Amino acid sequence: MSGSPKSDSSSCCSFFSQMKQRCPRPHGLLAHIVTKVVLSVLLFGVVWSITGKECYPGGNLFGIIILYFCATCGGKLVGLIHLPTLPPFPPLLGMLTAGLLLRNVPYVTDAVHIELAWSVALRNIALAIILTRAGLGLDPKSLSKLKAVCLRVAVGPCTVEASTVAVMSHFLLGLPWSWAFILGFVLSAVSPAVVVPSMLLLQEDGYGVEKGIPTLLMAAGSFDDILAITGFGTCLGVAFATGSTWMNILKGVLVVIGGSVAGLLLGLFICFFPSLDQEDMVLRRSAMLLGLAMFAVFGSHVAGFAGAGGLCTLCMAFLASLGWGTDKAPVAAVVGRFWDIFQPLLFGLIGAQITVSTLNLNTVGLGMACLTVGLVIRLIVTFLMVFFGGFNMKEKLFISVAWLPKATVQAAIGSKALDMARVSGDEVLEKYGLDVLTVAVLAILTTAPIGALGIGLSGPRLLSRYTQSDPEVVTDTPQKETSILESKL
């Protein structure tokens, strides 16, 4: 006679309990790798089952998936490079290099193909996410503490470097003045993707905390980027406008005013909607903010005011963050998750825009000359801007060195002019756009690692160190403000 169902069930539970004890659950690096591989294969399988031939070699989805996988792996590999006494290298270098290799390796190039329209759309989505994070990352309390010094550091080096690069590129590369200033503003933006993590590491160790140097650089970074993006959008509108010069200048002014006003109105709207009595407030706010940001970026192209969308997104996100107060942190975290997804795509696609065999060595050499002169002028101007700020000579030198790296903004807007030139079908404008993109990629490849190394090497040597045991030290950035600053670009 067979046993009762209850006894059979208890026997099975006992058996599985013993097996669980004898066979522990997988963990560690191997389990992490297996999970990632299975998720990647599953993603490919699901997309293939829906789209069919688009997932075959040469199809758009195949190219996007391979590019995303390679860029992610490239970023992870670069992130694993740890040298004693130095901050980690920016993962974006590995992402950019992965895209560059996929574009220039024979046979691989034909298999990993992404149509221009798809590439432009993905990069514009990444741009909308970047600008949203920049707007949410602005902290009025920190900025009010630093006041004039922050304003000088944000405005002075950016405008002078943009003007210097514009003059150099006009005479060396032969760019028209509008395109020369497009390149100038593309190169003039500092990279929070390099500066912010490095500053947080120094801040944790107490370097420069007494005088608020990490807070100064992290806060001024967003204003520097906003100024560069605004100048870029204005010059972009002038470069592609038709008609008289004065009408083009007027259109550039309208782009700035229209983008700002639209951003303020949309920001005021999402301060009140969704209302506080609705469920899933964080999800609804995040969806509305990102949706409006993408609509602003794409819609401005349709309306013929390409530069207005970025400025609108910045103003909208900043006003929304003021209205939400401390409740903006969960929304910033959601936007940060989207950035984690699109960051490999952005830098991978930017790298894939460069074909080494078609590069003009003369353009590369002269572009590097423009970049180098601009960096030297930027370093000098930054050093002068921090006078009368209460800093000693070593601290002034450190701030100047830390204000050099470029990466995120260059990747976001560096190819925008080329994309618009390709749509217009004008070969001359395409050549100008390719020159801008080439110099932007050179700026990322050279200044991002040099900037990270410069900050890591000079920080402990040039800044005074204080610990929590020092009774007279009061940090300028409380824990809550630090978490907000971490949500920057």
Image (cartoon, rainbow, N blue to C red):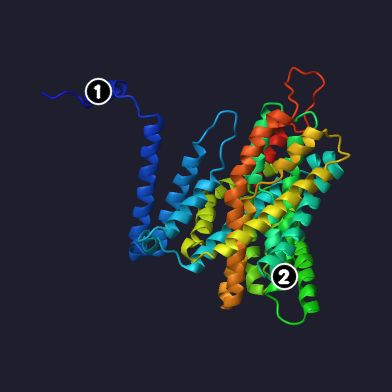
Is residue 85 at all visible to an observer of this figure?
Answer: yes
Residue under numbered circle 1: 15
Front-lying residue, 18 or 29: 29
Which numbered disc flags the more N-terminal residue, 1 or 2? Answer: 1
Q: Position of residue 169 (x, y in %)?
A: 69, 64
Q: Nearer the viewer, mark 1 or mark 2?
A: 2
Residue 117, relative to residue 125: is it above or below?
A: below
- Report the amino acid beneath label 1: Phe
Give the residue at x 69% y 46%. Answer: 404
Local crowd at mark 2 within 10 Å, few (<14), some, or many (≥20)?
some
Residue under numbered circle 2: 178
Residue farthest toward the left in the current orientation of the protein: 1
- Report the amino acid beneath label 2: Ser
Front-lying residue, 281 or 338: 338
Query: 4 left or right of 220?
Result: left
Measure the C-alpha gap from mark 1 to mark 2.
Answer: 76 Å
Front-lying residue, 379 or 111: 379
Residue 27, relative to residue 120: is it above or below?
A: above
Give the residue at x 70% y 48%. Answer: 136
Residue 24, relative to residue 223: is it above or below?
A: above
Q: Position of residue 122 (x, y in %)?
A: 53, 60
Q: Position of residue 44 (x, y in %)?
A: 36, 54
Q: Secondary structure at mark 2?
A: helix
